[in-house]
Every structure is written in C-alpha cells, then in structure tokens.
Image: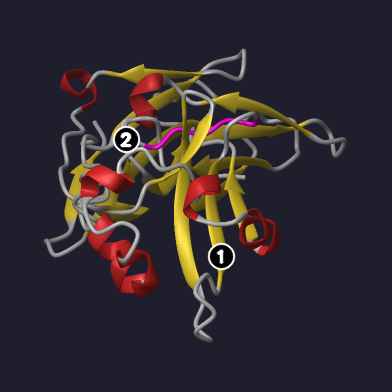
Amino acid sequence: NGLYNNMHSEDLDGDGYTDLVLGNYGLNSMFRASIEQPLSLYVNDFDNNGRTEQILAMHYDEKLYPIVQLKDLWMQIPSLKKKYLKFENYKNVTMDKLFDPSTIRDSEVKKVYNLSSVSLYNKKGKGFEIKELPFMAQLSPIFSIISDDINNDGIMDLILGGNLSRIKPEFGPNSSSYSTLLLGAKDNRFKYVNSKLSGLFISGEIRDLDKIKINNKDSYIFAVNNSKLKILESE
C-alpha cells in the first residue's frame, strides 16, 4: 500500500511481459511508513454527531501520534476543545490517549506501508519483482511517467515528472524535482542522469508527459500546472 499517483505500463526488460512503474509520494517529506509502522488514516464518527471524521497518524519512537493541527482537530471534533484547550496539553498525546480503545477498535483504518516509487518486473506471469527507483527519483511525488529508449541502447529508459505544492502548511510543499531521467540497464536497474547531462530542468507541478515528432525528431512534452507546455527536443 502506498500514496500512489501514477501507474505506467511497459515491457521494460523486453521479455514480452508487461512491467509496471508506480509513482509514489517519495521519501523527501515528514511522512514515514513501513510494514511495522505504517502511516495510518483513522476514519470514524469520533464524536457521534452523524458525520465522519478522518485522523492521520504516524509512529514516532514506537508510539502512534495524531499528526493533525490542534485547531483542525477542534474543527472536526469540537468536544475535544474542552480537554485540549492548549497545545501544551495536546503535543504529546498518542492515539490511544486521544480516543478510548473501543473508538480506535471500531475505526476503519487505511494503512500506507511504502512511500517509495518503484518498478515492478513481471516474472513471466508468476508475480512481480519489486525494485526501488534511484534516490533522486524519490525527492518528490511522481505524477507522470513516460518510457522510451532515449539513448538507443535497446533498453527502456524513464522520464519522471511530479512535485506537489498545494498541501497543508504543516506538511510542507514537496517540490524538489526538476523532472528526472533514468537510464535502464541490463540488470533491471535504473541509473539517474544528472540534469546538466540530461538537459532536464523543469520546475513546477508536472502532471503529464508525452512524446511527439517535431521536424522528424523525437520531442517530449511536459504539461505543468498553471504554466505553459514545455517541449524538449531529443538530440
């Protein structure tokens, strides 16, 4: 389970089976998630007012804490304002202290175990082998993926685009990517290419990628939120 934004399908290793690339939230944020300590969203009518609330929670030092601003918690569950009028009273409260055990037990819990963007290699129809994309592909959420043999070596490469700036202030913007070129290799690994070598340096929230021909040359279109299309021509 992850915070996936995009799924791209392609036969990456040329074996005739469709592989996948999953664009996830990335590893450059305050969020942390693992099998042992998942990022969790608790869904319930916590104050029995007929409306459903959602509380995001994350582990710190083996304990599960709500990661919700106190003022936002008041807005969702006004009854908690009596108990947590000041931040001093709320700052170290764990989920099992914030709500009684029966409320926690009766909540629907959505769990995230993985935040890494990954490639999934199809093992001839008998499951998938998961491989994490290089570190530089984890700097921001990935929303757009295109595959192509860019360096003409017979192995599929990837261009990634993403970023997320419109997010709650306490979580911080996640906009460290300027698009990413990953060259494929025979061992089913990808190698990051520095932006000075790749020529990719596109800021903003990239939400779609496509390949077209311009004057018989391969060109790549980058669709950026609230901005003009960016077009790069392959040399």
Q: Does the magenta-highlighted stretch encompass residue 34?
A: yes
Quick check: 195 left or right of 152? Answer: left
Quadrant of residue 208 in the image? Answer: bottom left
Quadrant of residue 35 in the image? Answer: top right
Q: Which of the two residues, 186 or 227, is positioned nearer the viewer here?
A: 227
Residue 198, placed above or below residue 65: above
Q: Quick one: SS at disc 1?
A: strand
Residue on which disc 2 sits: 29
Q: CA distance from mark 2 to mark 1?
A: 23 Å
Quick check: 156 left or right of 196? Answer: right
Residue on which disc 1 sits: 43
Residue 49, placed above or below residue 14: below
Tag shown at residue 76: none
Q: Which of the two residues, 233 or 136, is positioned nearer the viewer here?
A: 136
Residue 191, placed above or below residue 115: above
Q: Residue at x 20, y 61 (%)?
A: 225
In which quadrant is the C terminus drawn? top left
Query: Can I make out residue 36 in this image?
Result: yes
Mark 2 or 1: in front is 1
Q: Residue at x 39, y 37 (%)?
A: 31
Residue sticking out furthest to the top:
187
Q: Which of the two residues, 123 or 185, is positioned nearer the viewer here?
A: 123
Q: How many marks?
A: 2
Sequence-wise, the earlier of marks 2 and 1 is 2
In which quadrant is the N terminus drawn? top right
The segment highlighted magenta reads 31-35
Q: Residue at x 27, y 54 (%)?
A: 69
Q: Position of residue 28 (x, y in %)?
A: 32, 31
Residue 179, placed above or below residue 50: above
